């Protein structure tokens, strides 16, 4: 049964209880990791995910809270020790940031460092990110100060769907990504025009998409259940994403 793992649920403002927003989906021997703004390998281990199941890393956009941990990710999987190549998917600007960040380190003596296989995803609605026996993952542009994508992850095992807004103001493209999704993971950083969404706005997107369950992530410090009343008036199945929470789909 495929599972969504919320490896981190926090905003880029530091929080004692939530690290930066990072996700993984797992299905038996296949794990796809989404973003690496923090120590994502430690979070994978905390979630009980074996590192040798990592099939791919998706990087959504160039901001530090989504890609800043990339060199650490590479160092840790190398030491795990992983030797097979690591496929990395993302739009051009996100991959470029990862490449530049990694290039600042001298890795010439890291013997056996896994080869990075870069897969550039078109920054267009419905773009195919990856498809294999477990997953079909597509992307669409969202609204943020830098190029960014949301994701739709379909499990070929269960037929279940997870959608992820990533960082965005409320946008119809997430309604499309989240159409009839079992789990809509939507940011609720607090509304900033062109940048972020509020819990209420995320709930409106979930309702419009006919999603079944809304998990709020990219949460600012101090946001509690008590702040969800308005959101739940729009969409009853609204929850704060749980740090290291696991959700079947
Ligand atoms: Zn961002
Ligand atoms: Zn962010």
Image (cartoon, rainbow, N blue to C red):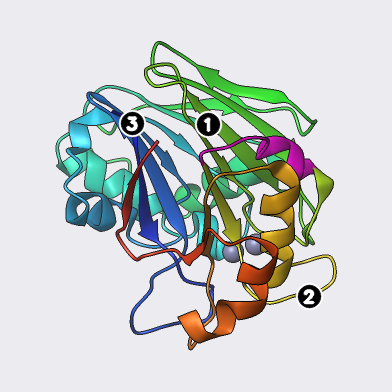
Q: Which residue is mark 3?
A: 2
Cα separation, mark 3 vs mark 2, equals: 34 Å
Residue where numbered disc 2 is placed: 192
Asked if the beta carbon under badge 3 is closer than 8 A to the nearest atom of ligand 2, the reply is no
- Look at the image and tell me in which quarter the C terminus lies: top left
Query: Which label's residue is closer to the chain start, 3 or 2?
Result: 3
Quarter assignment of residue 163? top right
Quadrant location, ligand no. 2: bottom right
In this rendering, the count of numbered labels is: 3
Queried whether the magenta region covers residue 168, the answer comes back as: no
Residue 28: % across, % down: 23, 25
In x, y percent, where is residue 86?
A: 37, 28
Q: Quadrant of the N terminus?
A: top left
Q: Who comes first in sequence, dot 1 or dot 2?
A: 1
Counting residues from the N terminus, which is met first, the one under dot 3 or under dot 1? 3
Image location (x, y in percent) of residue 122: 74, 27
Decide if residue 179 is on the left or right side of residue 133: right
Q: Whole-Å distance between the Cαs marked 3 and 1? A: 11 Å
Q: Any atom of ligand 2 within 8 Å of the CB at mark 1?
A: no
User: Tag 2's secondary structure?
Assistant: loop
Where is 85 relative to 10, above or below? Answer: above
As drawn, the label of residue 153 is 1
Can you name the residue that lies furthest to the top here?
A: 133
The tag on residue 39 is none
| Residue 197 shows in this picture | no
Q: Determine if residue 3 is in view.
A: yes
Residue at image coords 25%, 49%: 44
Q: Residues within 10 Å of mark 2 (few under 14, many from 20)?
A: few
* 212 lies above or below 46: above
Look at the image and give the residue range highlighted in magenta.
173-182
Which of labels 3 and 2 is toward the front?
Answer: 3
């Amino acid at each position: 049964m495929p599972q969504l793992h919320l490896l981190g649920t926090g905003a880029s403002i530091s929080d004692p209880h939530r690290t930066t927003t990072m996700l993984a989906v797992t299905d038996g021997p296949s794990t796809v990791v989404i973003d690496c703004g923090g120590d994502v390998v430690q979070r994978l281990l905390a979630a009980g995910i074996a590192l040798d199941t990592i099939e791919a890393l998706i990087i959504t956009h160039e901001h530090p809270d989504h890609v800043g941990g990339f060199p650490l990710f590479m160092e840790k999987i190398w030491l795990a020790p992983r030797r097979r190549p690591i496929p990395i998917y993302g739009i051009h600007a996100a991959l470029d940031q990862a490449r530049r960040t990694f290039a600042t380190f001298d890795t010439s003596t890291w013997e056996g460092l896994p080869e990075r296989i870069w897969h550039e995803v078109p920054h267009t609605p419905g773009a195919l990110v990856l498809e294999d026996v477990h997953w079909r993952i597509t992307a669409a542009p969202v609204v943020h100060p830098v190029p960014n994508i949301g994701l739709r992850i379909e499990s070929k095992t269960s037929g279940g769907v997870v959608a992820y807004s990533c960082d965005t103001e409320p946008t119809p493209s997430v309604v499309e990504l989240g159409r009839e999704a079992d789990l809509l993971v939507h940011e609720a950083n607090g509304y900033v025009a062109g940048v972020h969404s509020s819990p209420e706005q995320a709930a409106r997107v979930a309702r419009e998409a006919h999603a079944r369950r809304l998990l709020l992530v990219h949460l600012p410090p101090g946001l509690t259940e008590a702040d969800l009343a308005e959101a739940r008036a729009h969409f009853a199945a609204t929850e704060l994403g749980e740090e290291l929470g696991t959700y079947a789909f």
